[in-house]
Image: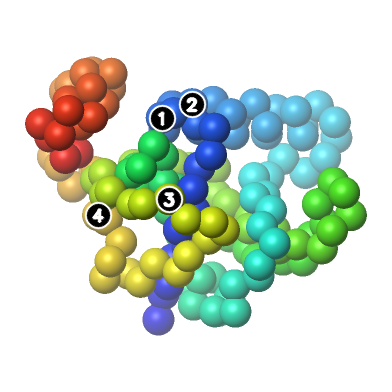
């Protein structure tokens, strides 16, 4: 049975900023002749590894809302730059926007059961493409819309 991960996206204000940051990261890795992959490091290793790798995603909380997810490709031992052992969460570079779901701040990551995961925004029959992103974010901040 699939289970997802939930993580705060600290220092990012919106999905576009996360996308830009990740694209730049992949370019830097390619220029340095390293494997261009998105690997998010975290101290705790998920014990439910098999369930996460069975189609699980990492859901990002941005400014108090779950807004986007990325498929988890692998969970593997890694080391932080200071030499501390950690878990590397390897992510698919494709960002899938979700219906915004409010979430309070927390430390580390949390499991997110499939039944509790917000649905993808694609199910809105293209409505998200009709409205400019900035306008949608402003209306959502004012709580006039929830997507």
Say which of 19 and 125 sits in front.
19
Which comes before the other along the chain, label 2 or label 4?
Answer: 2
Q: Nearer the viewer, mark 2 or mark 3?
A: 3
Dots 2 and 1: beta carbons under 8 Å? yes
Whichever of callouts 3 and 1 sits on the residue coming sooner in the sequence is 1
Q: Quadrant of the C terminus?
A: top left
- Structural distance between the alpha carbons of marks 4 and 3: 20 Å
User: Which residue is pictured at 49% across the width and 26% down the height?
Assistant: 17
Packing grade of label 1 (10 A; few <14, some 14-19, many >=20) is: some
**Residue 105 got which mark?**
3
Nearest to the eye among marks 3 and 1: give it. Answer: 3
State the separation of the CA atoms marked 2 and 4.
21 Å
Q: Is residue 126 above or below residue 105?
A: above
Label 2 sits on residue: 17
Indicate the colouring scheme. rainbow
The part of the image, by quadrant, that contains residue 111 is bottom left
Q: Which residue is mark 4?
A: 119
């Amino acid at each position: 049975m699939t289970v997802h991960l939930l993580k705060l996206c600290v220092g990012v204000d919106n999905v576009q900023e996360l996308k830009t940051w990740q694209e730049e990261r992949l370019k830097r890795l390619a220029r340095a002749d390293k494997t261009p992959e998105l690997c998010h490091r975290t101290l705790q290793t998920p014990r439910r590894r098999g369930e996460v790798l069975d189609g699980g995603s990492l859901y990002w909380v941005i400014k108090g809302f779950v807004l986007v997810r990325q498929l988890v490709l692998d969970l593997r031992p890694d080391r932080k730059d200071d030499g501390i052992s950690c878990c590397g969460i390897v992510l698919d570079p494709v960002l899938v926007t979700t219906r915004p779901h409010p979430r309070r701040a927390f430390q580390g990551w949390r499991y997110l059961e499939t039944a509790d995961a917000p649905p993808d925004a694609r199910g809105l029959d293209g409505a998200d493409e009709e409205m400019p992103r900035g306008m949608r974010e402003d209306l959502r901040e004012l709580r006039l819309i929830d997507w």
